[in-house]
Image (cartoon, grey):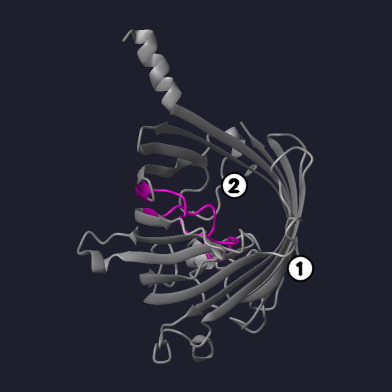
Amino acid sequence: MSVTAQLDSLLSKLSFEADFRFRVEQDWDSRKSDGSFREDRTRLRYRVRAGVNYTGKWYKVGFRIRTGNPRKQQDPQLTLGDGVQEFGTLPIGFEKAYFQGSWETFSFWLGKNTFPYSKNNELFWSDNVYPEGVFLQKEFDINTSVIDYFSVKGGHYIIATTNQSFDEDSYFQGFQVSTTLLKGRLTLFPSLYLFKNIPNIPDGNDTFLLDYTIAHIGTKFKVVDKAPLYIELDYYENLQDYSSNDSIPKNRRGQKSGFVLGLKYGKLSKKGDWAYGATYANLQQYSIVDFLAQNDWARWDYSSAGSPDGRLTNYNGVELVAGHKIGEKITLKVKYYVVEQLIPLGIAKENGSRIRFDIDVKF
Protein backbone atom coordinates (compact mmCIF):
# COMPACT_ATOMS: atom_id res chain seq x y z
CA MET A 1 0.00 0.00 0.00
CA SER A 2 1.36 3.41 -0.94
CA VAL A 3 2.03 6.15 1.58
CA THR A 4 -0.87 8.15 0.15
CA ALA A 5 -3.22 5.19 0.50
CA GLN A 6 -2.06 4.59 4.09
CA LEU A 7 -2.62 8.24 4.92
CA ASP A 8 -6.10 8.16 3.35
CA SER A 9 -6.92 5.02 5.34
CA LEU A 10 -5.79 6.69 8.58
CA LEU A 11 -7.72 9.88 7.92
CA SER A 12 -10.87 7.91 7.11
CA LYS A 13 -10.77 6.50 10.66
CA LEU A 14 -10.25 9.87 12.33
CA SER A 15 -13.08 12.19 13.29
CA PHE A 16 -12.76 15.68 14.74
CA GLU A 17 -15.11 17.68 16.95
CA ALA A 18 -15.06 21.23 18.25
CA ASP A 19 -17.51 23.73 19.68
CA PHE A 20 -17.63 27.25 21.09
CA ARG A 21 -20.04 28.82 23.59
CA PHE A 22 -20.50 32.47 24.48
CA ARG A 23 -22.67 33.36 27.48
CA VAL A 24 -24.18 36.52 28.95
CA GLU A 25 -25.23 36.01 32.57
CA GLN A 26 -27.03 38.20 35.11
CA ASP A 27 -27.53 37.34 38.81
CA TRP A 28 -29.60 39.27 41.34
CA ASP A 29 -31.48 38.90 44.62
CA SER A 30 -28.90 36.41 45.97
CA ARG A 31 -29.17 36.27 49.76
CA LYS A 32 -26.42 34.74 51.94
CA SER A 33 -26.95 32.56 55.00
CA ASP A 34 -26.15 35.52 57.29
CA GLY A 35 -29.06 37.49 55.82
CA SER A 36 -26.97 39.89 53.74
CA PHE A 37 -27.14 39.98 49.94
CA ARG A 38 -24.45 39.32 47.38
CA GLU A 39 -23.82 42.13 44.94
CA ASP A 40 -25.75 41.81 41.69
CA ARG A 41 -23.42 40.41 39.06
CA THR A 42 -23.13 40.54 35.27
CA ARG A 43 -20.62 38.26 33.53
CA LEU A 44 -19.52 37.53 29.98
CA ARG A 45 -18.28 33.94 29.67
CA TYR A 46 -17.07 31.49 27.04
CA ARG A 47 -16.03 27.87 26.55
CA VAL A 48 -13.98 26.10 23.87
CA ARG A 49 -13.72 22.33 23.37
CA ALA A 50 -11.94 20.24 20.75
CA GLY A 51 -11.44 16.51 20.34
CA VAL A 52 -10.17 13.71 18.11
CA ASN A 53 -11.48 10.14 17.79
CA TYR A 54 -9.97 7.12 16.04
CA THR A 55 -12.42 4.34 15.11
CA GLY A 56 -11.28 0.77 14.42
CA LYS A 57 -13.31 -2.32 13.55
CA TRP A 58 -14.54 -2.98 17.09
CA TYR A 59 -12.94 -0.22 19.17
CA LYS A 60 -12.62 3.52 19.47
CA VAL A 61 -9.96 5.74 21.07
CA GLY A 62 -10.46 9.42 21.72
CA PHE A 63 -9.72 12.50 23.76
CA ARG A 64 -11.10 16.01 24.16
CA ILE A 65 -9.67 19.17 25.68
CA ARG A 66 -11.52 22.16 27.08
CA THR A 67 -11.05 25.51 28.72
CA GLY A 68 -11.83 25.89 32.40
CA ASN A 69 -10.47 26.11 35.94
CA PRO A 70 -8.82 22.70 36.54
CA ARG A 71 -10.12 22.71 40.14
CA LYS A 72 -13.71 23.31 39.02
CA GLN A 73 -14.96 20.18 37.25
CA GLN A 74 -18.56 21.40 37.09
CA ASP A 75 -17.83 24.50 35.04
CA PRO A 76 -15.68 24.71 31.86
CA GLN A 77 -16.74 28.31 31.18
CA LEU A 78 -14.22 31.12 31.66
CA THR A 79 -15.22 34.65 32.62
CA LEU A 80 -13.79 37.48 30.55
CA GLY A 81 -11.20 39.30 32.63
CA ASP A 82 -11.33 36.86 35.57
CA GLY A 83 -7.92 35.45 36.45
CA VAL A 84 -6.37 36.12 33.02
CA GLN A 85 -6.10 39.91 33.23
CA GLU A 86 -3.90 41.75 30.79
CA PHE A 87 -4.77 39.19 28.14
CA GLY A 88 -2.81 36.29 29.59
CA THR A 89 -3.04 32.65 28.46
CA LEU A 90 -6.05 30.42 29.20
CA PRO A 91 -6.25 27.29 31.39
CA ILE A 92 -6.89 24.20 29.25
CA GLY A 93 -7.11 20.54 30.27
CA PHE A 94 -8.28 17.11 29.15
CA GLU A 95 -11.92 16.34 29.94
CA LYS A 96 -12.01 13.00 28.05
CA ALA A 97 -9.37 10.32 27.31
CA TYR A 98 -10.77 6.86 26.73
CA PHE A 99 -10.64 3.48 25.00
CA GLN A 100 -13.92 1.76 24.24
CA GLY A 101 -14.99 -1.40 22.47
CA SER A 102 -18.16 -3.16 21.40
CA TRP A 103 -19.20 -6.58 20.10
CA GLU A 104 -22.81 -6.93 19.00
CA THR A 105 -24.78 -6.24 22.23
CA PHE A 106 -21.85 -5.87 24.65
CA SER A 107 -19.77 -2.71 25.12
CA PHE A 108 -17.28 -1.20 27.54
CA TRP A 109 -14.95 1.75 28.05
CA LEU A 110 -11.83 2.45 30.09
CA GLY A 111 -10.38 5.82 31.10
CA LYS A 112 -12.15 9.19 31.45
CA ASN A 113 -15.37 9.54 29.51
CA THR A 114 -18.93 10.86 29.40
CA PHE A 115 -21.27 9.92 32.27
CA PRO A 116 -22.66 6.67 30.80
CA TYR A 117 -26.04 6.36 32.55
CA SER A 118 -29.39 7.58 31.26
CA LYS A 119 -30.59 10.84 32.82
CA ASN A 120 -33.13 13.58 32.14
CA ASN A 121 -31.10 16.57 33.31
CA GLU A 122 -27.94 17.68 35.12
CA LEU A 123 -29.46 17.90 38.60
CA PHE A 124 -27.84 14.63 39.73
CA TRP A 125 -24.74 14.67 37.53
CA SER A 126 -23.38 17.62 35.55
CA ASP A 127 -22.72 17.21 31.83
CA ASN A 128 -19.34 18.82 32.51
CA VAL A 129 -18.17 16.12 34.97
CA TYR A 130 -16.42 13.18 33.26
CA PRO A 131 -15.87 10.14 35.52
CA GLU A 132 -12.68 8.07 35.43
CA GLY A 133 -13.00 4.31 35.63
CA VAL A 134 -14.37 1.18 33.99
CA PHE A 135 -17.83 0.89 32.42
CA LEU A 136 -19.70 -2.19 31.07
CA GLN A 137 -23.01 -2.48 29.21
CA LYS A 138 -25.10 -5.35 27.88
CA GLU A 139 -28.06 -4.65 25.57
CA PHE A 140 -31.07 -6.87 24.87
CA ASP A 141 -33.31 -6.35 21.84
CA ILE A 142 -36.64 -7.52 23.24
CA ASN A 143 -38.97 -5.99 20.63
CA THR A 144 -42.24 -7.31 22.03
CA SER A 145 -45.63 -5.62 21.88
CA VAL A 146 -44.78 -3.82 25.16
CA ILE A 147 -40.97 -3.73 25.62
CA ASP A 148 -38.83 -2.31 22.83
CA TYR A 149 -35.35 -2.27 24.36
CA PHE A 150 -33.57 -3.33 27.54
CA SER A 151 -30.02 -2.73 28.78
CA VAL A 152 -27.97 -3.32 31.92
CA LYS A 153 -25.11 -0.95 32.83
CA GLY A 154 -22.51 -0.99 35.56
CA GLY A 155 -19.17 0.53 36.44
CA HIS A 156 -16.56 1.51 39.01
CA TYR A 157 -15.14 5.07 39.03
CA ILE A 158 -12.39 6.55 41.19
CA ILE A 159 -12.96 10.09 42.43
CA ALA A 160 -9.68 10.35 44.36
CA THR A 161 -7.10 7.62 44.92
CA THR A 162 -5.25 7.11 48.20
CA ASN A 163 -2.57 4.93 46.53
CA GLN A 164 -3.63 2.16 48.90
CA SER A 165 -6.25 -0.57 48.45
CA PHE A 166 -9.34 0.19 46.32
CA ASP A 167 -11.66 0.28 49.34
CA GLU A 168 -9.69 3.21 50.75
CA ASP A 169 -10.26 5.34 47.63
CA SER A 170 -12.98 7.92 47.23
CA TYR A 171 -15.10 6.25 44.54
CA PHE A 172 -18.55 5.50 43.25
CA GLN A 173 -20.19 2.54 41.57
CA GLY A 174 -23.22 2.85 39.31
CA PHE A 175 -25.76 0.22 38.27
CA GLN A 176 -28.70 0.90 35.98
CA VAL A 177 -31.41 -0.94 34.09
CA SER A 178 -32.77 1.04 31.15
CA THR A 179 -35.77 0.12 29.03
CA THR A 180 -38.13 1.68 26.49
CA LEU A 181 -41.75 0.61 26.19
CA LEU A 182 -44.88 1.34 24.18
CA LYS A 183 -43.06 1.88 20.87
CA GLY A 184 -40.62 4.31 22.43
CA ARG A 185 -43.14 6.53 24.22
CA LEU A 186 -42.07 5.50 27.74
CA THR A 187 -38.51 5.26 29.03
CA LEU A 188 -37.63 3.89 32.48
CA PHE A 189 -34.18 3.83 34.04
CA PRO A 190 -34.04 2.75 37.70
CA SER A 191 -30.51 3.08 39.11
CA LEU A 192 -28.41 2.51 42.21
CA TYR A 193 -25.34 4.64 42.94
CA LEU A 194 -22.92 3.73 45.73
CA PHE A 195 -20.58 6.54 46.84
CA LYS A 196 -17.80 5.71 49.31
CA ASN A 197 -15.45 7.95 51.31
CA ILE A 198 -16.85 11.17 49.84
CA PRO A 199 -15.49 14.39 51.41
CA ASN A 200 -18.05 16.81 52.81
CA ILE A 201 -16.05 19.63 51.16
CA PRO A 202 -14.27 19.08 47.82
CA ASP A 203 -10.68 19.92 46.85
CA GLY A 204 -8.94 18.69 49.98
CA ASN A 205 -10.54 20.92 52.61
CA ASP A 206 -12.88 18.27 54.01
CA THR A 207 -13.55 17.74 57.72
CA PHE A 208 -15.18 14.30 57.46
CA LEU A 209 -16.02 11.58 54.92
CA LEU A 210 -19.46 10.34 53.99
CA ASP A 211 -21.01 7.36 52.22
CA TYR A 212 -24.09 7.65 50.00
CA THR A 213 -26.37 4.85 48.75
CA ILE A 214 -28.65 6.59 46.27
CA ALA A 215 -31.61 4.81 44.70
CA HIS A 216 -32.91 6.64 41.65
CA ILE A 217 -36.12 6.13 39.70
CA GLY A 218 -36.06 8.01 36.39
CA THR A 219 -38.70 8.10 33.69
CA LYS A 220 -39.60 10.02 30.54
CA PHE A 221 -42.99 9.84 28.85
CA LYS A 222 -44.02 11.18 25.45
CA VAL A 223 -47.48 12.61 26.10
CA VAL A 224 -48.68 12.82 22.50
CA ASP A 225 -47.57 10.23 19.98
CA LYS A 226 -47.13 12.68 17.10
CA ALA A 227 -45.90 15.73 19.03
CA PRO A 228 -42.55 16.28 20.87
CA LEU A 229 -44.16 16.86 24.28
CA TYR A 230 -42.51 15.03 27.20
CA ILE A 231 -42.98 14.69 30.95
CA GLU A 232 -39.84 13.81 32.92
CA LEU A 233 -39.72 12.60 36.52
CA ASP A 234 -36.79 11.74 38.79
CA TYR A 235 -36.92 10.56 42.39
CA TYR A 236 -33.83 10.14 44.58
CA GLU A 237 -33.54 8.44 47.97
CA ASN A 238 -30.29 8.14 49.91
CA LEU A 239 -30.61 4.90 51.88
CA GLN A 240 -27.75 5.64 54.28
CA ASP A 241 -28.59 6.21 57.96
CA TYR A 242 -27.02 9.42 59.29
CA SER A 243 -29.04 9.58 62.51
CA SER A 244 -25.97 8.94 64.68
CA ASN A 245 -23.49 10.94 62.58
CA ASP A 246 -22.32 13.72 64.90
CA SER A 247 -20.60 15.53 62.02
CA ILE A 248 -24.00 16.41 60.52
CA PRO A 249 -26.34 18.87 62.31
CA LYS A 250 -29.44 17.11 63.67
CA ASN A 251 -31.86 19.10 61.51
CA ARG A 252 -30.11 17.86 58.34
CA ARG A 253 -29.47 14.18 59.12
CA GLY A 254 -32.78 13.15 57.57
CA GLN A 255 -32.44 15.35 54.47
CA LYS A 256 -31.92 12.49 51.99
CA SER A 257 -34.77 12.67 49.43
CA GLY A 258 -35.27 14.59 46.23
CA PHE A 259 -37.50 14.80 43.19
CA VAL A 260 -37.47 16.63 39.88
CA LEU A 261 -40.42 17.22 37.56
CA GLY A 262 -39.92 18.50 34.04
CA LEU A 263 -42.10 19.40 31.06
CA LYS A 264 -40.35 19.65 27.67
CA TYR A 265 -41.63 20.53 24.22
CA GLY A 266 -39.77 20.52 20.92
CA LYS A 267 -36.24 19.57 19.91
CA LEU A 268 -33.22 21.30 18.42
CA SER A 269 -32.12 18.95 15.66
CA LYS A 270 -32.30 21.11 12.52
CA LYS A 271 -32.34 24.75 11.45
CA GLY A 272 -35.49 26.57 12.48
CA ASP A 273 -36.38 24.24 15.38
CA TRP A 274 -37.66 25.60 18.69
CA ALA A 275 -37.64 23.92 22.11
CA TYR A 276 -39.08 24.91 25.49
CA GLY A 277 -38.80 23.49 28.98
CA ALA A 278 -39.89 24.01 32.58
CA THR A 279 -38.33 22.10 35.48
CA TYR A 280 -39.12 22.09 39.20
CA ALA A 281 -36.53 20.62 41.58
CA ASN A 282 -36.67 19.83 45.29
CA LEU A 283 -33.37 18.27 46.42
CA GLN A 284 -32.59 17.80 50.10
CA GLN A 285 -28.97 18.16 51.15
CA TYR A 286 -27.86 14.51 51.04
CA SER A 287 -30.13 13.29 48.24
CA ILE A 288 -27.21 13.67 45.79
CA VAL A 289 -23.52 14.65 45.88
CA ASP A 290 -23.62 18.40 45.39
CA PHE A 291 -20.18 19.05 43.86
CA LEU A 292 -20.72 16.45 41.12
CA ALA A 293 -24.09 17.89 40.04
CA GLN A 294 -24.83 21.08 38.09
CA ASN A 295 -23.82 24.45 39.49
CA ASP A 296 -26.03 26.47 37.14
CA TRP A 297 -29.08 27.28 39.20
CA ALA A 298 -27.53 29.55 41.88
CA ARG A 299 -24.35 31.23 43.14
CA TRP A 300 -23.84 28.81 46.02
CA ASP A 301 -20.35 27.35 46.33
CA TYR A 302 -17.61 26.27 48.75
CA SER A 303 -15.46 29.37 48.25
CA SER A 304 -15.56 30.15 51.98
CA ALA A 305 -13.94 26.72 52.54
CA GLY A 306 -11.28 27.18 49.86
CA SER A 307 -13.00 25.34 47.00
CA PRO A 308 -14.47 26.82 43.79
CA ASP A 309 -17.00 23.98 43.42
CA GLY A 310 -20.75 24.49 43.64
CA ARG A 311 -22.98 23.16 46.43
CA LEU A 312 -26.37 22.84 44.72
CA THR A 313 -28.43 20.73 47.10
CA ASN A 314 -30.76 21.72 49.95
CA TYR A 315 -32.95 23.82 47.66
CA ASN A 316 -36.13 24.00 45.66
CA GLY A 317 -36.47 26.05 42.53
CA VAL A 318 -37.57 26.45 38.94
CA GLU A 319 -35.75 26.51 35.61
CA LEU A 320 -37.40 27.93 32.46
CA VAL A 321 -35.68 27.34 29.10
CA ALA A 322 -36.28 28.40 25.50
CA GLY A 323 -34.02 27.45 22.59
CA HIS A 324 -33.87 28.15 18.86
CA LYS A 325 -31.63 26.61 16.21
CA ILE A 326 -30.80 29.52 13.92
CA GLY A 327 -28.45 27.48 11.73
CA GLU A 328 -27.33 23.90 11.23
CA LYS A 329 -24.42 24.53 13.61
CA ILE A 330 -25.67 27.47 15.72
CA THR A 331 -28.11 27.36 18.64
CA LEU A 332 -29.45 30.12 20.89
CA LYS A 333 -30.78 29.44 24.39
CA VAL A 334 -32.14 31.50 27.26
CA LYS A 335 -32.44 30.05 30.79
CA TYR A 336 -34.09 31.61 33.83
CA TYR A 337 -33.71 30.35 37.43
CA VAL A 338 -35.33 31.09 40.78
CA VAL A 339 -34.01 29.17 43.81
CA GLU A 340 -34.57 29.10 47.59
CA GLN A 341 -32.89 27.03 50.28
CA LEU A 342 -34.87 24.33 52.13
CA ILE A 343 -33.09 24.47 55.51
CA PRO A 344 -31.00 27.54 56.37
CA LEU A 345 -27.31 27.03 57.15
CA GLY A 346 -27.33 30.25 59.15
CA ILE A 347 -29.94 32.77 60.28
CA ALA A 348 -31.54 33.10 56.82
CA LYS A 349 -32.38 30.94 53.84
CA GLU A 350 -30.16 31.54 50.82
CA ASN A 351 -31.91 32.32 47.55
CA GLY A 352 -31.16 33.73 44.14
CA SER A 353 -32.34 34.65 40.66
CA ARG A 354 -30.38 34.24 37.44
CA ILE A 355 -30.84 34.59 33.68
CA ARG A 356 -28.49 33.34 30.95
CA PHE A 357 -28.22 33.82 27.21
CA ASP A 358 -26.10 31.26 25.35
CA ILE A 359 -24.94 30.97 21.78
CA ASP A 360 -23.46 27.56 20.90
CA VAL A 361 -21.52 26.93 17.71
CA LYS A 362 -20.37 23.51 16.50
CA PHE A 363 -17.68 22.95 13.91
- For the stretch drawn in magenta, the main secondary structure is loop
Q: Residue shown at 39%/87% (left/top)?
A: 245
Would you say residue 117 sits in the magenta stretch?
A: yes
Amino acid of disc 2: Gln
Task: Check disc 2: other Cα within 10 Å, few if <14, some if 14-19, many if 20+.
Answer: many
Would you say residue 81 sits in the magenta stretch?
A: no
Q: Residue 99 occupies which quadrant of the picture?
A: top left
Amino acid of disc 1: Asp
Residue of label 1 = 29
On the image, the x and y values in percent for residue 299 come to 64, 63
Q: Nearer the viewer, mark 2 or mark 1?
A: 2
Give the residues in magenta: 106-132
**Secondary element type, mark 1:** loop
Instruction: Count how many numbered circles sit on residues in the image.
Output: 2
Asked whether residue 267 is in view, the answer is yes
Closest to the observer, 116 or 163 = 116
Mark seen at residue 238? none
Closest to the observer, 327 or 178 = 178
Task: Tell me the quadrant of the picture where the C terminus can be found.
Answer: top right
Horizontally, residue 125 falls left or right of residue 61, namely right
Residue of label 2 = 77
